Amino acid sequence: MPSRSTGTITQDWEPVVLHKNRPKAQDLRNQKAVNQALRSGAEVQTIKKHDAGANKKNAPVVYARKLDEETEPAALEKVRPEVRMVIQKARLEKKMSQADLAKQINERPQVVQEYENGKAVPNQAVLAKMERVLGVKLRGKIGGK
């Protein structure tokens, strides 16, 4: 038989403390959990979020009354016919296509097309690039070479 020690017996165990897990945020939003908390008398916090869940873009709201009171013209100024003709004439004299001009001024071909069709809103930077490439004046007094 094995021999036993006759000394004093000691306990080497560390105490283990179990903690209750905190509820997850998703569980706190669950209707069942909210009802249970209300029944037990626990404090329940409710927050109404403005436009929560709405699929709206962050666009400013324009009121019809404010538009009616507006004194500025509603339409934006487009490229003048003289400017259109000068651009087109200068481009054809240099034997360039709209795509070639667009490449040289570092813009899309659609931009040049809109300027020549009179649909574009004039941008001084684009006009300056066109002036430099075509060698004509497009801003201020028109038509001078």
Image (cartoon, rainbow, N blue to C red):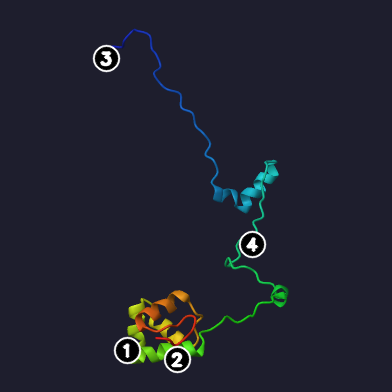
Would you say the residues marked 1 and 3 are in contact, meaning their CB atoms lie under 8 Å apart?
no
Of callouts 2 and 3, which one flags the residue occurring earlier in the amino acid sequence? Answer: 3
- Disc 1 designates what residue? 94
Residue type at mark 1: give it: Lys
Would you say the residues marked 2 and 3 are in contact, meaning their CB atoms lie under 8 Å apart?
no
SS of the residue under disc 1: loop
Foreground residue, 98 or 52? Answer: 98
Residue 77 position, x and y percent, is: 56, 82
51 is higher (above) or lower (below) than 99 = above
Q: Quadrant of residue 137?
A: bottom left
Residue type at mark 4: give it: Asp
- Disc 2 designates what residue? 85
* Residue sitting farthest toward the left: 1
Q: Is residue 4 left or right of residue 138?
A: left
Q: Which mark is in front, 1 or 4?
A: 1
Q: Quadrant of residue 136?
A: bottom left
- Disc 4 designates what residue? 51
Give the Cα separation between the discs numbered 1 and 4. Answer: 57 Å
Q: Report the disc number at residue 2.
A: 3
Q: Residues within 10 Å of mark 2 (few under 14, many from 20)?
A: some
